[in-house]
Amino acid sequence: MAVTDRLPQQPQQVDAVVVGMGPGGEEVAGRLADAGLDVVGVDERLLGGECPYWGCIPSKIMVRAAGLVAEAHRIPGTAGTAMVHPDWRPVARRVREATDDWNDKAAVDRFTSRGGRFLRGRGRLTAPGEVTVGGMDGGETVLRPRRAVVLAVGSEPSVPPVPGLACTPYWTNREMVEAAELPESLLVLGGGAVGLEFGQVVQRFGTAVTVLEVAPRLLGHEEPEVDEVLMRALTSDGVEVYTGAEPASVSYDGGRFTVECARGERLTAERLLVAAGRRVDLTRLGAGVLEVDDTAPALPVDARMRVPGQDPGGPGVWAVGDVTGHGAFTHMAMYQADVAVRAILGRGGPQAEYHAVPRVTFTDPEIGAVGLTEAEARQRGIAVRIGRADLAATARGFIHGPGGDGFVKLVADADAGVLVGGTVAGPYGGEVLGVLSVAVRARLPVAELAQTIWAYPTFHRAIGDALRELT
Ligand SMILES: Cc1cc2nc3c(=O)[nH]c(=O)nc-3n(C[C@H](O)[C@H](O)[C@H](O)COP(=O)(O)OP(=O)(O)OC[C@H]3O[C@@H](n4cnc5c(N)ncnc54)[C@H](O)[C@@H]3O)c2cc1C
Ligand SMILES: NC(=O)c1ccc[n+]([C@@H]2O[C@H](COP(=O)([O-])OP(=O)(O)OC[C@H]3O[C@@H](n4cnc5c(N)ncnc54)[C@H](O)[C@@H]3O)[C@@H](O)[C@H]2O)c1
């Protein structure tokens, strides 16, 4: 079926409408189309969403390039000599190849070849069971789905209300990913995943980076030990880091940004990247018609991803991905999409559960974590026991040498005898994390895990060392 730029004016009866075609929406819409439903997918930007065009994929292409530069710098003293001349041009070129120069034709063709119809425009709930799409040409299309409305509108960069900031030409992740050339200096507002991944990358390509984090720690929702490891890594790269630093004003004089901090620092740079979290705009989506609080930070959903409280006589309303507030990760959007598809098709299966959500921040060292942190477990009244291992003290850490800083930290429920969380910081931390994701998800007994034979000399063997502290 061909791409539909504009459907006819009268309300269209369809089986399902998916608003937002990022990783979550694309998965739902594609699978419903595979099942033979008449599905319309709606997106105001590119079919594929943030992840392939301005998020995961281009940022990890950059991370990979910066990792090569960092490894080359580790040759002296370990493998000879190396002259490293980092050049952003091949990185920018790879990003353009990966995003097809921010063109979604291949993705649209893939979806329509499965039987779906794609409508480019902004979708808005205009009544229960009705989505109105404002097209790029100013026209409107009204869709009345018989079976399902799926809201998968993702999130957008949150711009903090710092005086002056809104009037400046700041960058978000979108401009950062699209940069064909790097600035000579960059101020990063926010020491979360976006700010640290991009900040470390561009520092390694010669930009002088300063990170300003309002909270006392970097990646503040993770274990405090993560902040220590990242501080060492970033400062050894040359990144200047200010934590507990609240920006009081931002100005731009046509060439440079200046940030004045409440406690007195005055920082300037050629560019400013806002990486201060994400927001969901439910009002713009028209979520008020669902009788939910449209000023809330996320759409409420039940364990089948259904927005509760809808008229049983109308089509069901589901939501998946960032908009649900269960973790802004592509793997979360895909996981929830699977639950929603099975619910819409009446196929049952397991409900959504969030006790073992993995997350990986692709800094060097990588920070992988799953489940609860120690502080979260204590807040829940769990009888916490902690197991730790320092990577540098392991055979593999010693062998690895420079760049091998990191740790494994396990959080156990001593009463239940299972792991409720774990963190792996270090080389391939996100890969090593896989073992812990399975252990936490399946609630494997600590006593059983401790009997595992961990191959020598691997990084994952440090999990065995940390488990010894728990048995
Ligand atoms: C720089 C960066 C790096 C990231 N790296 C990772 C990573 O390594 N791993 C990971 O798991 N996650 C990563 N993420 C997060 C990941 O990109 C998101 O969690 C994921 O894209 C969310 O998918 P989604 O389907 O919920 O929404 P999105 O990908 O945000 O897609 C939503 C879509 O809805 C559309 N839309 C919104 N409102 C409307 C409307 N009213 N009408 C029509 N269309 C609408 C948007 O145009 C968009 O295409 C990263 C994010 C960023 C910013
Ligand atoms: N590797 C990955 O999986 C990956 C990578 C990038 C983004 N993401 C997803 O995208 C989400 C958004 O990333 P993010 O880094 O923008 O958000 P974040 O919420 O992870 O971090 C934002 C940081 O900005 C700080 N902040 C807020 N206001 C500030 C201000 N006025 N001045 C200085 N600092 C301020 C916060 O304290 C916080 O530490 C992540 O939470 C994650 O779910 C995932």
Image (spheres, rainbow, N blue to C red):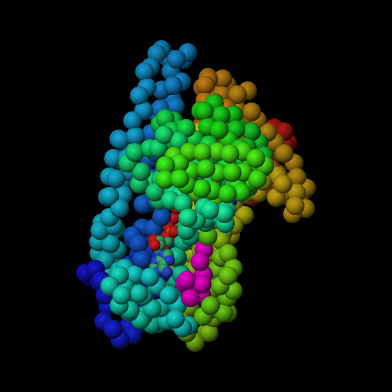
Q: Going 45% across and 15% down the picture, which residue do you hit?
A: 76
The answer to whether residue 309 is above or below residue 201 is below
The picture places residue 437, in percent across and down from the top left corner, at: 56, 46
The answer to whether residue 80 is above or below residue 117 is above
Q: Is residue 417 left or right of residue 35?
A: right
Residue 467 visible to an observer of this rendering: no
Give the position of the C terminus as an image quadrant.
top right
Residue 107 visible to an observer of this rendering: yes
Q: Is residue 63 left or right of residue 92?
A: right
Q: Going 38% across and 34% down the picture, which residue do you hit?
A: 65
To which quarter of the image does residue 88 belong?
Answer: top left
Q: Which of 264 and 438 lies nearest the eye of the viewer?
A: 264
Count of numbered circles on the image: 0
Query: Magenta region, mostly helix, strand or loop?
Result: helix
Q: Which segment did they paint magenta?
A: 280-287
Q: Which of 239 and 124 lies nearest the eye of the viewer?
A: 239
The picture places residue 68, in percent across and down from the top left corner, at: 40, 29
